[in-house]
């Protein structure tokens, strides 16, 4: 029993140290909406689902007094399922010497690497949702291949306007940019000059902070979207109407893929591909104007996915795994990081002359409101 207590304390200490390292790696997990995790009970299994309700629009009507009340207007909210389909682990073997270091409060290098690997996997997964087939982001500003903010904040202001036009709430907005875009932004007088920005934190701490209606955050994990579509792609349909979400195409170009962003001749709206075949493409949002037959698609080139995003754009959930207890053949401990809310489990099992350690996490996410984000291409 004494040995069990000592091992348990070591596990709890290691998890706590690991979470300290984890805080510095996560960007989107701190930003996206995680209110739905309260619906997940302990012991949730891979494949468990949380449904997120998306409200339907309601039309205002005139009131006319009468002895008979008018019919109740039916409202049918839609649901987006968030499936806990991601179960990842970062295992490693730890020598007795490394276990001794944990007892002394020294975090082993392999533990740091495991935490880094798992945290980056989670962060990259959330980024991947932005171009996923279910609900890709479609608002787009800036120029592909050109790092924004070289001379001004116009790219951000254009993204802000795009969100405003989509009726995005003005609170809880975040501008997440890569290291190159941040380097440009930090050099802007409007941010660095305290007399212009009203704050010294940018120049003193290298933190842009809250500016122009959004909290600016740098992330090394901002991905680059590789556009699949190429060549000549034309509308092959004479009756495209406002509100359509599928159109046939021809022209001999390379078939597009989910997340590719495009415009159509005669229409200034940017669209994102949800799915495609060799003859049809499904996209969002719905067509804003009627497209002419043989109107040309123009696809955005490969671009860095800097983004201005509202927290309600993405729903993300992590399941609380097995609580601290002795299990057959080993020890497990679960800790929830108060800063990011990430729930990690560390399991320890004794093997031949060494100890097997494994950090794991069960999670899932989905874009529920794609209109609440806009790319700032880089």
Image (tube, rainbow, N blue to C red):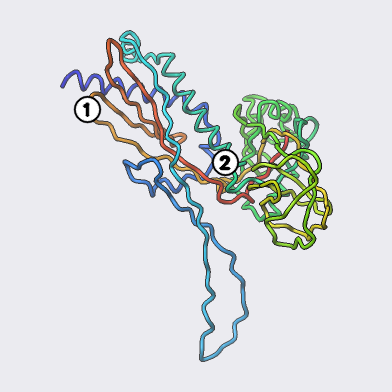
Which is more toward the observer, 51 or 299? 299
Please name the residue that numbered disc 1 is placed on. 328
| Cα gap from disc 2 to disc 1, whole angstroms | 37 Å
Q: Residue at x 64, y 45 (%)?
A: 137
Residue 365 located left or right of residue 374 = left
Give x and y (percent) for residue 37: 42, 45
Residue 302, quarter of the rendered image: top right
Residue 87, quarter of the rendered image: top left
> Which numbered tag is attached to residue 276?
none
Please name the residue that numbered disc 2 is placed on. 129
Residue found farthest to the top: 97
Pointer 2 with pointer 1, Cβ within 8 A: no
Residue found farthest to the bottom: 67
Tag 1's secondary structure?
loop
Give x and y (percent) for residue 176: 63, 36
Q: Dot 2, how many residues are within 10 Å of its Cα: few (below 14), some (14-19), or many (20+)? A: some
Residue 172 located left or right of residue 16 = right
Q: Dot 1, how many residues are within 10 Å of its Cα: few (below 14), some (14-19), or many (20+)? A: few
Give x and y (percent) for residue 352: 27, 12
Task: Tell me: residue 61, above or below residue 265.
Answer: below
Which is more toward the observer, 270 or 39? 270
Task: Give the mark nearer the N terminus: 2 vs 1.
Answer: 2
Q: Residue at x 21, y 22 (%)?
A: 5
How many marks the image carries: the answer is 2
Give x and y (percent) for residue 85: 44, 40
Tag 2's secondary structure?
helix
Please identify the quadrant where the C terminus is shown: top right
């Amino acid at each position: 029993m004494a040995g069990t207590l000592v091992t348990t304390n070591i596990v709890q200490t290691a998890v706590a140290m690991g979470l300290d390292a984890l805080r510095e790696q996560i960007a989107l997990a701190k930003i996206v909406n995680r209110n739905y995790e309260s619906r997940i009970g302990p012991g949730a299994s891979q494949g468990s689902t949380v449904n997120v309700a998306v409200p339907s629009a309601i039309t205002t009507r005139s009131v006319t007094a009468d002895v008979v009340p008018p019919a109740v207007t039916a409202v049918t909210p839609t649901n987006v399922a968030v499936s806990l389909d991601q179960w990842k682990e970062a295992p490693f073997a730890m020598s007795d010497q490394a276990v001794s270091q944990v007892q002394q409060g020294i975090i082993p290098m392999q533990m740091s690497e495991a935490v880094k690997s798992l945290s980056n996997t989670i962060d990259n997964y959330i980024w991947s949702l932005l171009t996923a087939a279910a609900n890709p982001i479609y608002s787009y500003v800036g120029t592909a291949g050109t790092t924004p903010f070289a001379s001004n904040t116009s790219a951000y202001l254009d993204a802000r306007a795009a969100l405003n036009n989509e009726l995005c709430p003005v609170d809880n907005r975040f501008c997440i940019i890569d290291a190159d875009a941040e380097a440009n932004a930090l050099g802007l007088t409007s941010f660095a000059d305290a007399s212009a920005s009203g704050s010294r934190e940018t120049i003193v701490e290298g933190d842009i902070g809250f500016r122009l209606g959004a909290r600016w955050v740098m992330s090394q994990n901002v991905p680059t979207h590789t556009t699949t579509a190429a060549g000549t792609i034309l509308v092959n349909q004479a009756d495209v109407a406002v509100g359509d979400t599928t159109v046939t195409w021809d022209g001999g170009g390379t078939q597009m893929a989910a997340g590719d962003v495009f415009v159509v001749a005669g229409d200034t709206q940017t669209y994102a591909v949800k799915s495609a075949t060799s003859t049809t493409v499904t996209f969002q949002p719905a067509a804003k104007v009627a497209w002419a037959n043989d109107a040309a698609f123009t696809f955005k080139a490969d671009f860095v996915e800097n983004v201005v995003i509202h927290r309600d754009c993405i729903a993300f959930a992590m399941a609380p795994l097995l609580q601290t207890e002795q299990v057959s053949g080993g020890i497990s401990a679960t800790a929830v990081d108060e800063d990011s809310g990430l729930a990690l489990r560390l399991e320890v099992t004794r093997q031949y002359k060494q100890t097997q350690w494994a950090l794991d996490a069960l999670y899932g996410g989905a874009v529920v409101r794609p209109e609440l984000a806009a790319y700032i291409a880089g």
